[in-house]
Amino acid sequence: MSVKNILITSAGSQLQLVKESIKAWKGRDYMVKVFTCDMNPESSMSNTVGDGCFKVPICTSEDYVETIVSLCLGNDIKYIITMTEREYLILSANKKLFAKYNVGVLDGVDTIR
């Protein structure tokens, strides 16, 4: 059985959607670990869902993309799903960088295979 690790960014901004997504992924025919990240995980409930939670800088920070790449590499994350358009625009502008590490940046149309 394959493992598909997922990182959800800005998890605190759409907590109910994150919870429902985790529930749906856990029912698949593959193993999945869902990690979340947020600027302030301690002040939201995003640190209570998923298999791990990380604190990251604001997405406009110079080291935001580097931080996300590091999290992906350190946790064998294969897919990034963003909860805000702002983050999606920043991460999707770096799709080639993420693809170099076999990490997909997904939007609302993409699916996890």
Image (cartoon, grey):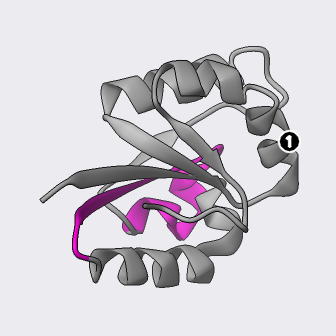
Q: What is the quadrant of the N terminus in the image?
A: bottom left
Q: Quadrant of residue 95?
A: top right
Q: Which residue is denoted by mark 1 in the rendering?
A: 89
Q: Is residue 91 left or right of residue 97?
A: right
Task: Answer whether residue 59 is visible to the viewer in this image.
Answer: no
**Residue at position x 44%, y 31% in the image:** 72
* Residue 113 percent across, percent down from the top left: 43, 61
Residue type at the position of mark 1 = Leu
Please tell me which residue is depicted at 28% across the width and 61% down the height of the picture: 32
Question: Is residue 79 or residue 46 the one in the foreground?
Answer: 79
Whether 69 is drawn above or below 84: the answer is above
Q: Nearer the viewer, residue 1 or 71?
A: 1
Q: Residue at x 29, y 76 (%)?
A: 26
Q: Callout 1: 10 Å neighbours few (<14), some, many (20+)?
A: few
State the count of labels. 1
The answer to whether one can see residue 47 in this image is yes
Question: Residue 14: x and y, percent?
Answer: 67, 73
Q: Is residue 58 above or below residue 81?
A: above
Whether residue 106 sits left or right of residue 111 in the image: it is right
Q: Which quadrant would residue 83 be assigned to in this image?
A: bottom right
Q: Residue 56, how many percent across, how many down? A: 59, 34
**Residue 11 located left or right of residue 58:** left
Mark 1 residue element = helix
Q: Residue at x 56, y 27 (%)?
A: 99
Q: Is residue 39 magenta?
A: yes
Residue 71, relative to residue 25: is it above or below? Answer: above
Residue 47 drawn at (x, y percent): 44, 59
Magenta stretch: give its range: 29-48
Does the magenta-highlighted stretch encompass residue 93?
Answer: no
Q: Is residue 1 left or right of residue 101?
A: left
Residue that sits furthest to the front in the current view: 113
